[in-house]
Amino acid sequence: MNKKLLMWCAAGVALGCCFQGFSAVPFARPDAMRGTALRNVRLQGVPAEKMNNFFRARMLDVSAQRDVFGEARSAFRTRSDDELPVVPGKKMGGLWRGEFWGKLMLGTARVADYLQDPALTKFVDEECRRMIELQDPDGYLGSYEDKENVWIPPEVKPEMAKVYGWNTVWNLWNRKYAIWAMLMAYKTTGDRAILDSTMRQMDQWIEMMHRLKLPLFVTGQPEKVGLPSMSILKPLLMLYAETGKQAYLDYAKEMLPDWDRADGACPNFFRNADRTDPLYTWYPNPQGWGKSYEMMSCLDGLLEYTRMTGETRSLETVRKIYENLVRTELNVLGDVGYVDQFYGAAGQPNACTEVCDTIHWIRLNLDLYLMTGEKKYCDAIEIAYFNAFLAGVFRDGTWGAFAVRGSVRHDHDRQCGYAYNHCCVNNVPRTFMDMAEGTVTVDRTGTFHVNFYQDATVTLDGVTFEISGNYPVGNTVTVKTSKIVKPAFRKPAWCPKMDVVQGKDGRVWTLAFDMNPRLLDGPDTEVAKKEGWHYSRYMCRQQPLKSELRDAYRSTPAATLMVGPLLLAKCCRTGATRNELMDFTTVRGKGYSVKVSPATGDGVWGAWDVELTKPGEPTIKTRACDYQSAGDDPYSHGAVRFSVWF
């Protein structure tokens, strides 16, 4: 491998990890694209206002550093996630509070690199050192008192089910996030003590699992077929890239045969990848094993395996499974899955999706884009980001949603008895940073690619790009460059025509997008009954004010309306009445055409007057806004907030 390619590989590892310098082991299979170092990007515009509010409220404010991080860290001090005795003298159970600190730090370390804020970087370093003080001499750092509590013996399963209602052990899943977060913190701070702690955690994990003679395939919650534990694959390989320690690569290689089994054991990614039937039909009980973001985390680990070994079967397996998910699980909100499960979401007449799923769907698409250069992955990122993701982030930055719905309101529950931490909320910064990394990329020929058109300033390889235009509410974007270059501009798949005009000085481009307003019918679906698994997921079990949710639950599909990449919604903020939002009549499949005109709306990013017309029928008029603006705060406008159904 020549010197230039080695530098490209090292830079690729660096950018994926927010690293100050080169890694010990470069990619064996170089990526097609290289993203931008976070410190060289500034996202702007309305989404960035929401992002910056979130950063202030959740990680920059001194009280947030004390309360949010303090509560998350307490899980490692009390070690009570295996809190209930299921059998005499043995704690076996069932919480995941230990994931909160890792998710929180994973995002904060990247934000510190993005902001280049010395105070935040200092906090990252000091917070990690506080965690190191809680680490056992053998390297264990976890939220379970019994460090070897990683699997559920068959004789204990019935007793656990009586106590918890499920069979669950999240010990290794929690530890994965601590390991990953501290690796990222090291890359931001350069503090060798943090890297040493990370390695001791991973070394203890491997030694313990070998001593117990337990493959990861059998650990954790049995119904989830080891997926939470096996999601260690990505951070494990990132740690290998950083340190060059062969034991980490060897452990990764131990894991893969359990996804390539002659006995066909679920989920058998490699041998099932060529199947054309929906993924959730591969095995019985998909509501148990088809856990969306745990599975996507494992798929992302397979991509990392291809990067670090050059073995392309893993990449091709992920690409095939990805296409299966697009066909069978892509929901109207731009995400995959149905409230953290793969269970045929593409065919559901009610839309509800977990924000953690959206975050991991975006990350999976970004890695696939960087590895292959195929722009369809950027198209998927754009739709998910502007709709399902941004809808799940409170506009004041103080909190976010667990699940976002197609109508009524989103779900804003707490978890595990904690006041300040939640799985989805703690994950939010990661997607903003993924968008920053992927806005402008460069390929191995030196061609720059402008992928996303949110207002931003990006500097890559000495060239600065200034992107403006309030996209996608605005349909005209200006791109200015500090030097004369010939960038490639992504033409979104939804856009029938994109005009690109270069200015006379060669450094300014004007892009005009046909925003293509369109009614989408979606697939024909079976009647959704107000009972059973889908219904309970839609209700999110703990959701207050359930009567409106029950009343709005659809038994038949309806049309949705998109303008550019934006899903539109009728909502209180644009004057919709409760009766309009709860109306089950639909124009779906009735031959209506749509016309939209920009309008004004209080408290929304974009608003449009909508006219639905059909020869011989009265024109239907309403006003709609961008979906992410419709319900991105607590229930200040009442229990019924919005609807995407037309």
Image (cartoon, rainbow, N blue to C red):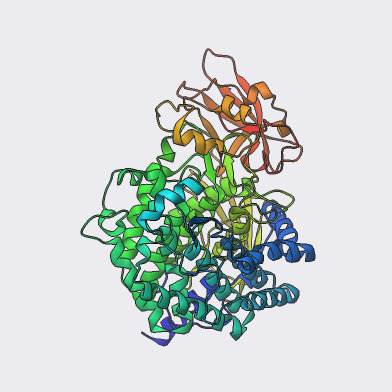
Single out the residue that lies furthest toward the front. 88
Q: Nearer the viewer, residue 506 or 74?
A: 74
- Is 424 positioned to the left or the right of 312 in the image? right
In the rendered image of this protein, does residue 597 appear above or below residue 414? above
Q: Nearer the viewer, residue 465 or 328?
A: 328
Work out which quarter of the rendered image holds the N terminus and state it: bottom left
Single out the residue that lies furthest toward the left. 262
> Horizontal and vertical percent for residue 170?
49, 59
Q: Nearer the viewer, residue 508 or 332?
A: 332
In the rendered image of this protein, does residue 471 appear above or below residue 507? above
Work out which quarter of the rendered image holds the C terminus and state it: top right
In the rendered image of this protein, does residue 609 appear above or below residue 500? above
Image point 46% across, 45% down: which residue?
337
> Horizontal and vertical percent for residue 443?
46, 70
- Is 362 positioned to the left or the right of 575 in the image? left
Q: Quadrant of residue 426?
A: bottom right
Q: Nearer the viewer, residue 124 or 447?
A: 124
